[in-house]
Image: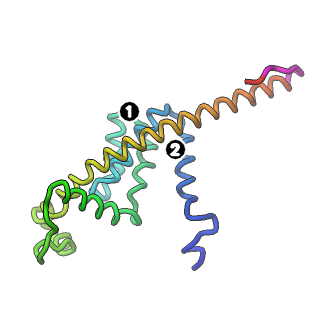
Amino acid sequence: MREFLWPRKGLLRPLRYYRLRILRLGATPHSIAIGFASGIAMAWTPFLGLHLGLALVLSYFLSGNLVAAALGTTLSNPATFPVICAVTWETGRWLIGGEAPTGAGTDLVDLLEKMQFRELWGPVLKPMLVGALPLSLGSAVILYTVTFFAVRGFQRRRRLQQTRRQQAALAGALGGDFPSV
C-alpha cells in the first residue's frame, strides 16, 4: 500500500522521464517546441479522447514534431482532467459573463446520461471551449519558449560532449594531443 501512495523512486519521476524524452528528440528545437506546445494547447480542450488526434493534426500543420505533440497531451490524464474541466468551465463562464447553471435541467450527470447535446452545449461545453482558448494560448506560448530554449541548450551541450569525445578518441588513436574545444 505504501508503494502505491508514495513510490520509492518518487512522485516526480514521470515528470523527469517526460522532460528527458522531449529533450532527446532528434529534431530542431523549434519543431520540438511547436509540437509540445500543440499537445499542451489541445490538452486544455474539453474533447476527451480527441486530444491526441487534434494535437497531431495541429502539430503537422505547424510543422511540429509529432512525438512531442503526443507527449504534450499527457497533461490531460485521468488525474488532471477534472481540474482542467473545472478551470476551463469557470474561466469560460467568467469570460462569457454567465451564471452558474441551476436546476435539474442542467445537471451534468443527467445531461451526459441522456446525451442531449443541445442542453449540454449552452451550460457546459460552450463555457469550456471559451475558457480553453486563453488557457491554451497562454500555456502554449509559455511552454513553447521554455521548451525551445531547453532543447536548444541540451542539444548544444550534447554536440559539445560528442566533439570532445571524438577529439579524445582521435588523440588516443594517433598518440598525439589535440586542443580541446
Residue 122 shown left or right of residue 140 in the figure: left
Q: Which residue is mark 2?
A: 22
The location of residue 149, given as percent across then percent down, is: 50, 36
Q: CA–CA distance between discs 1 and 2?
A: 16 Å
Residue at screen point 34% across, 34% down: 62
Q: Quadrant of residue 170?
A: top right
Q: Which residues are magenta?
A: 173-179
Q: Disc number at residue 63?
A: 1
| Vertical placement of residue 17 versus 141, above or below | below
Residue 177 shown left or right of residue 120 in the figure: right
What secondary structure do most residues of the magenta stretch adopt? loop
> From the image, which quarter does the N terminus lie in?
bottom right
Label 1 vs 2, first from the N-terminus: 2
Q: Disc number at residue 111?
A: none
| Vertical placement of residue 51 versus 167, above or below | below
| Vertical placement of residue 103 versus 58, above or below | below
Q: Nearer the viewer, residue 5 or 131?
A: 131
| Vertical placement of residue 79 versus 95, above or below | below
Residue 175 is covered by the magenta coloring = yes
